[in-house]
């Protein structure tokens, strides 16, 4: 920011107070029960998921878990 902001003491006008609509911090942390498994995957699959994770600043295990969760919820009986 090279331009300096110039403030004035002018009247703002009608102000409307909005109630807080943001969730509480503890509601932002979504923790789900997990089960540890051992799974053998091809190197090319792992490299693919690691690339996606690196691009989006995540961990590759989380990318795989999200993929499996989405797939299973999509095709599970409703």
Image (cartoon, grey):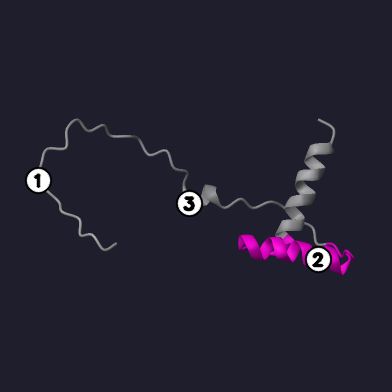
Q: Is residue 16 magenta?
A: no
Q: Are marks 2 and 1 in contact (CB under 8 Å)?
A: no
Image point (47%, 44%), residue name: 23
Image point (76%, 44%), residue name: 70
Q: Quadrant of the N terminus?
A: bottom left
Mark 2 lies on residue: 46
Residue 27 in percent (x, y) is at 53, 47
Q: For the residue carrying disc 3, how many other residues have a C-alpha within 10 Å: few (<14), some (14-19), or many (20+)?
A: few
Q: Is residue 55 above or below residue 30?
A: below
Q: Are marks 3 and 1 in contact (CB under 8 Å)?
A: no
The quadrant in which residue 50 appears is bottom right
Q: Which numbered marker is on residue 25?
A: 3
Mark 1 lies on residue: 9
Q: For the residue carrying disc 2, how many other residues have a C-alpha within 10 Å: few (<14), some (14-19), or many (20+)?
A: some
Magenta segment: 37-61
Q: CA distance from mark 2 to mark 1?
A: 59 Å
> Is residue 22 rendered to the left or right of residue 13?
right
The quadrant in which residue 39 appears is bottom right
> Is residue 64 rendered to the left or right of residue 10?
right
The quadrant in which residue 14 appears is top left
Q: For the residue carrying disc 1, how many other residues have a C-alpha within 10 Å: few (<14), some (14-19), or many (20+)?
A: few
Q: Secondary structure at mark 1?
A: loop
> Disc 3 or 2, which lies upstream in sequence?
3
> Is residue 66 rendered to the left or right of residue 55?
right
> Disc 3 or 1, which lies upstream in sequence?
1
Q: Secondary structure at mark 3?
A: helix
Q: Is residue 59 above or below residue 18?
A: below
> Disc 2 or 1, which lies upstream in sequence?
1
Residue 29 in percent (x, y) is at 57, 53
Please name which of the two marks, 3 or 1, marks the residue nearer to the observer: 1
Q: Quadrant of the C terminus?
A: top right
């Amino acid at each position: 920011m090279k331009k300096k902001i110039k403030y004035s003491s002018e009247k703002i006008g009608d102000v409307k107070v909005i109630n807080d609509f943001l969730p509480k911090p503890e509601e932002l942390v979504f923790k789900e029960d997990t089960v540890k498994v051992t799974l053998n995957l091809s190197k090319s699959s792992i490299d693919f998921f690691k690339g996606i994770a690196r691009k989006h600043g995540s961990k590759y295990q989380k990318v795989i878990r999200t993929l499996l969760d989405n797939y299973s919820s999509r095709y599970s009986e409703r």
